[in-house]
Image: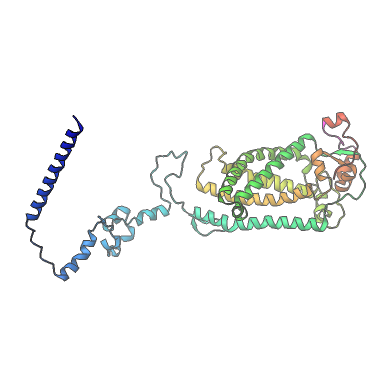
């Protein structure tokens, strides 16, 4: 087929389409118009307008539960209706169901009770913790944490830090009054130092991470922003959870390692009455550990330490056989918060005296040795027992084998 035949066929198709279109137009023009519907009166049209709006393009409209049965609440048994009975007179009014949920009713849950004992409970029952109103347990916990633990705990830590700063500004580092002799006494064995440093490092990790998690949104979040603060708290949360069990183990080792020399003695009363001589400038005789160190040992390491570790293990869900309900976790969280803040406040003073507060104190824990002058001035009774032969000057096997450290001056 040549191109002339193709053009001829296209032309015939166009002509046929035009004829059909013209015929259709003529038929439409000859069709008589349908008679106009009689106009409705204006009043009738106005009355029908709201009805039309109700059944407009929006489809099914929602019902007002109080318009369905506006006098339903006049029934004497209205307040005692269950959710099914209320649904008959006021469909959609689920007040009875939510009233039961608010009262702590348990619903059905397919989760095993051993793994999720409160899976069917949405809202905890009413309780009143110390410092909270009588309200649901979750809200009571929030009130105690936000109204008491956070503001007063943060204030306590700031007061302790400020007091230490003022004391250091006024007194400075406690220097030795006499000249160093160069003769060393072993104050801490390698085992004692390892236990102490493990406990100290984990404590610092827990303290820093805990402070950031509890107070960080007040002084870090406005500076770094929510994205970086979220990553920071997530990282520190994991540090906190892993350092906690290590701190617990090291705390037990520290307790039994230093127990022998921390028993109270009658000389401790004199030390406490004179404030350790920190304000008078006159040293008060003491044994290997003075009364202040013994207070930290018994109240900080043992007392607060046991509370902090026990509540932390509950929060980590590491205690076998314990049912971990929300109420249990809330109580553990409040106890943990109070105990850790008190422990940090107490240990801040201990850290100060062990670092910049006293010349030679940090060197003693770092190297294990102190000069005889240091021992005589700060722990005279301990020094006298060593000179009398009651306590060996070198206690670790390594020190005895090598005759103690070289006779050099102790670092400040």
Q: Which residues are magenta?
A: 389-396
Is 217 magenta? The answer is no
Of residues 225 and 277, the one nearer the viewer is 225
Where does residue 117 sit, x and y in percent of width and height?
46, 42
Q: Residue furthest bottom?
A: 43
241 sits to left or right of 28:
right
Q: Is residue 50 left or right of residue 131?
A: left
What percent of the width, then of the height, locates residue 142?
53, 55
Horizontally, residue 63 falls left or right of residue 18, namely: right
Is 11 located above or below residue 138 in the figure? above
Q: List x then y, in percent, for residue 233.
A: 59, 46
* Residue 13 % position (x, y): 15, 40
Eyeballing the image, is 384 above or below 97?
above
**Nearer the observer, 251 or 4:** 4
Query: Which residue corresponds to the image point at 60% horizontal and 46% vertical from the top-left?
Result: 232
Quadrant housing residue 371: top right
**Which quarter of the picture shows residue 302?**
top right
The answer to whether residue 278 is above or below residue 320 is below
Residue depicted at 29% across the width and 62% down the height: 66
């Amino acid at each position: 087929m040549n191109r002339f035949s193709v053009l001829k066929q296209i032309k015939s198709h166009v002509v046929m389409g035009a004829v059909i279109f013209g015929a259709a137009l003529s038929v439409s023009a000859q069709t008589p118009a349908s008679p106009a519907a009689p106009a409705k009166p204006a009043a009738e049209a106005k009355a029908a307008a709201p009805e039309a709006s109700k059944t407009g393009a929006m489809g099914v409209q929602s019902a007002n539960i109080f318009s369905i049965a506006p006098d339903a609440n006049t029934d004497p048994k209205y307040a005692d209706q269950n959710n099914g009975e209320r649904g008959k007179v006021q469909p959609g009014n689920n007040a009875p169901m939510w009233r039961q949920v608010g009262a702590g009713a348990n619903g059905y849950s397919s989760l095993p009770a051993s793994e999720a004992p409160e899976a069917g409970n949405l809202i905890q029952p009413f309780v009143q913790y110390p410092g909270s109103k009588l309200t649901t347990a979750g809200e009571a916990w929030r009130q105690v944490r936000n109204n008491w633990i956070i503001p007063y705990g943060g204030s306590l830590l700031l007061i302790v830090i400020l007091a230490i700063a003022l004391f250091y500004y006024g007194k400075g580092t406690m220097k030795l009054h006499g000249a160093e002799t160069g003769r060393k006494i072993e104050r801490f064995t390698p085992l004692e130092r390892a236990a102490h440093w493990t406990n100290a490092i984990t404590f610092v990790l827990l303290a820093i991470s805990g402070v950031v998690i509890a107070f960080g949104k007040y002084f870090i979040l406005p500076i770094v922003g929510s994205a970086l603060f979220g990553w920071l708290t997530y990282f520190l949360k994991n540090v906190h959870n892993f350092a906690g069990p290590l701190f617990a183990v090291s705390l037990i080792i520290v307790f039994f390692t230093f127990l022998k020399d921390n028993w109270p003695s009658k000389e401790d009363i004199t030390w406490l009455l004179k404030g350790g001589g920190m304000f008078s400038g006159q040293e008060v005789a003491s044994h290997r550990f003075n009364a202040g160190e013994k207070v930290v040992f018994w109240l900080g390491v043992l007392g607060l330490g046991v509370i902090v570790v026990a509540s932390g293990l509950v929060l980590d869900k590491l205690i076998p056989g314990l049912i971990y309900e929300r109420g249990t976790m809330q109580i553990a969280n409040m106890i943990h918060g109070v105990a850790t803040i008190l422990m940090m406040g107490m240990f801040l003073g201990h850290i100060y005296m062990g670092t910049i507060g006293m010349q030679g104190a940090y060197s003693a824990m770092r190297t294990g040795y102190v000069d005889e002058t240091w021992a005589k001035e700060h722990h005279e009774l301990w020094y006298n027992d060593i000179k009398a032969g009651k306590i060996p000057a070198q206690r670790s096997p390594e020190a005895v084998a090598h005759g103690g450290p070289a006779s050099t001056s102790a670092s400040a």
